[in-house]
Amino acid sequence: MTVRVAAATAAFVCIVATAMPCVGQGKLPSEMAWTAYDTGSSGFNIAVAIGQQLKQKYGSDLRLLPSGNDTGRLAPVRAGRAVISQMGIGTYFAQEGVFEFGQKAWGPQPARLLMTATSCNGLGLAVARDTGVKTVADLKGKRLGIVVGSPALTQGALALLGFAGLGATDVKTVEFSSNNAMWKGMVNNEADIALSSTISGQSKEMDTSPRGVIWPSMPSTDTAGWARVKKKAPYFVAVQATCGSGGLTPDKPVEMAGYAYPIFMTYADRSEEQVYVITKAMIDSYADYKAGAPGADGMALDKQNFTWVVPYHPGAIKAFREKGAWSDAAQKHNDALIARQQVIAAAWKAFGANAPSDEKDFAAGWLKARAAALTKSGMDVIFE
């Protein structure tokens, strides 16, 4: 087996294989490279579990290339050195051409999904229990931890505060140098709020600290609240979190925010047949890897969200159609997402023809050009 999992570290090595067993009408590559989050992360471990089954069932050797940031994970895929990137919400930012993807070296990326994982956890506002907070509205005046250089975390947290009509001026922001530093600050009573998954190690550590942790409810029935969230972060969806810190169980769930993680994606120009056989193999081997890592059960076919914010690759769609899971409504939604990407890509090309050389002027000018193109096409700007 290419991927050898050590009990604690999920380390791996790669050995080139020659077998190319059939999957449907095609064959999995004898060797593949995927990119993923850092070694030991939940996303990395899920990829390891899938890789084990691709080897055992189809003889395909998987080499994982870990990286701690979005551009580091996407670069090998863009360059053709990796087939798939296992991403987080950076997939959406790449499509939209914002944050680090609003720089000259990147720009909007033609992202396409294969599959995503949606498990029992939520991903929302973790709040110190000792603050006495019960609802999102109670967060007014509290201290929000943010990580310098991580606009995704800041964007997400502020969007969720919008559920109660709150914004940046309603909380006290406290800056930290890293995610781990922010959580250490939470434990040490330097901050009260942080964006997190209910199953993250940091939130579990917070839960066992004297401060404790809770997850304020965000009921799906509050349509106005969710409309405010989606105006700033349309990738969030209402989920019923039944596992993780804060005492979440199937008997004591909390309706809150979440989105799929990890997100298996590639580029629009990649071979339809190759993406098809990979997706089909992931679907067909699900029963064998679903218990292989925490969260891997979220890869189930019936947990895929076909009307999310990033379009699916034609190869993946072919696999879904064969399983009877793809609908005309899903296709219509997918076509609309691709049209959005085309508008943004055209705006990027036009802007680049006479773009300023200064990096700050470039970034600011691009956001204006992007907003103008989307507005003209009757599409939501989201990032301004």
Image: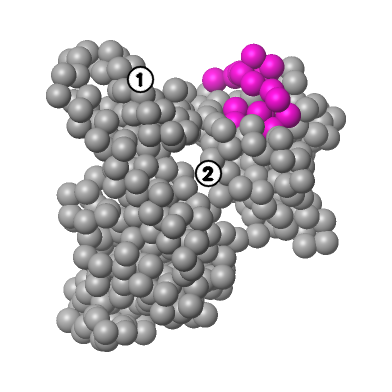
Horizontal side of residue 56 vs 290, given as left or right: left
What residue sits 28% from the left and 13% below the top? 361
**Relative to 250, is 85 on the left or the right?**
left
329 w.r.t. 246: above or below: below
Question: Mark 1 = which residue?
Answer: 368
Determine if residue 72 is in view: no
Res 358 → quadrant: top left
Mark 2 nearby-residue class (10 Å; few <14, some 14–19, many ≥20): some
**Residue 21 within the magenta-colored segment of the rendering:** no
Is residue 174 one of those drawn in magenta? yes
Image spot of residue 7 (x, y percent): 49, 66
Q: Residue at x 43, y 72 (%)?
A: 320
Q: Could you say where residue 79 lies in the image, as x and y percent from the top left? A: 17, 49
The quarter of the rendered structure image containing the C terminus is top left
- Amino acid type at circle 2 is Tyr
Q: At which x and y percent is residue 319? A: 38, 74
Q: Residue at x 45, y 30 (%)?
A: 381
Foreground label between 2 and 1: 1
The residue that mark 2 highlights is: 235
Q: Which residues are magenta?
A: 157-175
Q: Is residue 70 depicted above or below 303 in this figure? A: above
